[in-house]
Image (tube, rainbow, N blue to C red):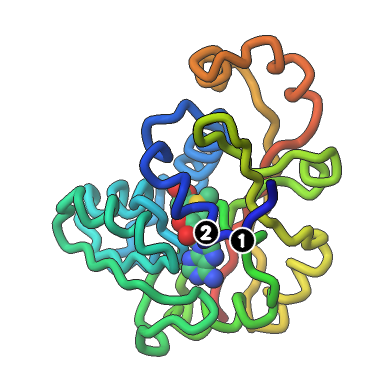
Amino acid sequence: MQISAVEGYRLWAPAYDSMPNPVLALETRVMRRLLSSNRSTRVVDIACGTGRWTRYFADRQATVFGIDLCQEMLYLARRRQLPRSHFILADALRVPLRTASAGLVLCSLALGHFEDLDQAFTEMARIAQPGAVVAISDLHPEALAAGWTGSFRVGKLEYSIANFRHSASSIFAAARNAGLHLNTKTEAHFAAPELGAFAAAGKQGHFNRFRTTPALWAGLWQKI
Ligand SMILES: C[S@@+](CC[C@H](N)C(=O)[O-])C[C@H]1O[C@@H](n2cnc3c(N)ncnc32)[C@H](O)[C@@H]1O
């Protein structure tokens, strides 16, 4: 059954952090490498969910603002009681933060939930200070074309969360139009480090089939 993003994450929230998830494992591996040298002290985590990345940056002494439209995901984020962290129930397309207030804007695994790409990039660029990094990751367009979805089970029902299939060219154009300069882009396949997550999810048999499709893309832009 296909459902909207907010409704989907409302149902998924209680299991989101405990369910073994190879995509989260891969995304963590890729983004940690890309962001390892970032020392920003003011981070905005757009569509922060349960605060996975908020915690990472709070642990590195940053002040972090987590923005999400799903009350149930934010409840779990707040429950972490992270230092220097503030969680705000808001739409990523209308972020209630000051212009040029962030040294790093992160949007992890959520861009496909935003129908209006131009508005999403305009907002991320607006809150970024000149010189700030805007870091984005999401499911790869080829994975979406192959039919991969964000799906989960509650009891006997399987839910699939609506995802807009933005092409790579439309993503790069929206970023450029918002005044962002592309510094790094990468795509990633599942590899040995994710084998454990496949096994824990009881999907070890899927690993060899899935590893041939690019699973994730990530990009780092700089606010000009
Ligand atoms: C796959 S989760 C990613 C959460 C987190 N970034 C992570 O990497 O673990 C996607 C998140 O996007 C949020 N979301 C979807 N549409 C949104 C919107 N328009 N504004 C803010 N958050 C949104 C959902 O509520 C959900 O928490």
**What residue do we see at 36% from left, 84% from top?**
97
Q: What element carries label 2?
A: helix
Instruction: Residue 16 in the image: state x and y as whole percent.
Output: 42, 40
State the residue lying farthest toward the front.
Answer: 156
Asked if one can make out residue 108 in the rendered structure from this viewpoint, the answer is: no
Q: How many labels does the image show?
A: 2
State the residue lying farthest toward the bottom.
Answer: 99
**Number of other residues with Cα within 10 Å of mark 1, as a class: few under 14, some 14 to 19, many 20 or more:** some
Instruction: Residue 184 in the image: state x and y as whole percent.
Output: 64, 55
Q: In the rendered image, which quarter is residue 116 located in?
A: bottom right
Instruction: Residue 185 in the image: state x and y as whole percent.
Output: 68, 53
**What residue do we see at 69% from left, 51% from top?**
2
**Number of other residues with Cα within 10 Å of mark 2, as a class: few under 14, some 14 to 19, many 20 or more:** few
Front residue of 194 and 180: 194
Residue position marked by numbered label 1 in the rendering: 4
**What residue do we see at 54% from left, 40% from top?**
27
Question: Looking at the picture, does residue 125 appear above or below residue 87?
Answer: below
Front residue of 21 and 170: 21
Q: What element carries label 1?
A: loop
Q: Does the residue labelled 2 lie within 8 Å of ligand 1?
A: no
What's the residue type where badge 1 is placed?
A: Ser
Question: Looking at the picture, does residue 8 appear above or below residue 29?
Answer: below
In the rendered view of the protein, which quadrant contains the C terminus?
Answer: bottom right
Residue 162, disc: none
Disc 1 to disc 2: CB gap under 8 Å = yes
Q: In the rendered image, which quarter is residue 153 located in?
A: top right
Residue position marked by numbered label 2 in the rendering: 7
What's the residue type where badge 2 is placed?
A: Glu
**What residue do we see at 28% from left, 64% from top?**
64
Asked if one can make out residue 132 in the rendered structure from this viewpoint, the answer is: yes
Instruction: Residue 188 in the image: state x and y as whole percent.
Output: 68, 36
